[in-house]
């Protein structure tokens, strides 16, 4: 499942931009590849993140993987529900399973992310 209103990274994170803030999560492909998500380590609100740099980890039954920020900025919110309900990522990765919100420091970075079409082409290579 690929949402038309999102941007994507090659590392299978998605970004929804609303104003000067971007919401970040992992894609349906990523959650399916990982299997049952059991734990997510997220940064604290106020943490500065850089595009393509790790901002946390996701632990699933099959593997542990790093999470990479699609854009640079300051973390303005985290999904606190994931601390007790990490499985929300498997149930609704594009909705209740969102991870962090980033106040964008360089909105032009969004243009460097994959479009839904480009992300779909990337998935066809798997």
Image: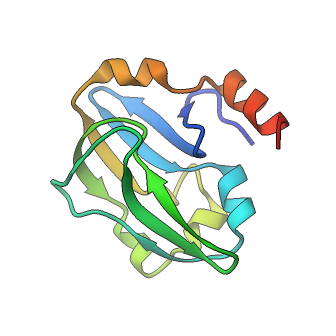
* Image quarter in which the N terminus is found: top right
6 versus 35 height, above or below: above
Count of numbered labels shown in the rendering: 0
Position in image of residue 110 (x %, y %): 41, 24
Position in image of residue 14 (x %, y %): 53, 41
* Image quarter in which the C terminus is found: top right
In the picture, measured across the screen, residue 46 lies left or right of residue 34, that is left
Which residue is found at the position 66% from the left and 60% from the top? Answer: 31
Which residue is found at the position 66% from the left and 55% from the top? Answer: 30
Position in image of residue 38 (x %, y %): 56, 80
> Is residue 42 or residue 78 the one in the foreground?
42
In the picture, measured across the screen, residue 35 lies left or right of residue 15, that is right
- Colour scheme shown: rainbow
Position in image of residue 84 (x %, y %): 44, 82
Residue extending farthest left: 46
In the picture, measured across the screen, residue 126 lies left or right of residue 117, that is right
Which residue is found at the position 47% from the left and 21% from the top? Answer: 112
């Amino acid at each position: 499942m690929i949402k038309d209103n999102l941007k994507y990274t090659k590392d299978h994170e998605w970004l929804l931009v609303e104003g000067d803030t971007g919401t970040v999560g992992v894609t349906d492909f990523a959650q399916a590849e990982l299997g049952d998500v059991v734990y997510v380590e997220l940064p604290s609100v106020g943490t500065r993140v850089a595009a393509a740099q790790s901002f946390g980890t996701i632990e699933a039954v099959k593997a542990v993987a790093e999470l990479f920020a699609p854009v640079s900025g300051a973390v303005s919110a985290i999904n606190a529900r994931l601390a007790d309900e990490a499985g929300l990522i498997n149930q609704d990765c594009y909705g209740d399973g969102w991870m962090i919100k980033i106040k964008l420091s360089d909105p032009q970075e969004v243009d460097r992310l994959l479009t839904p079409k480009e992300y779909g082409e990337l998935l066809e290579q798997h």
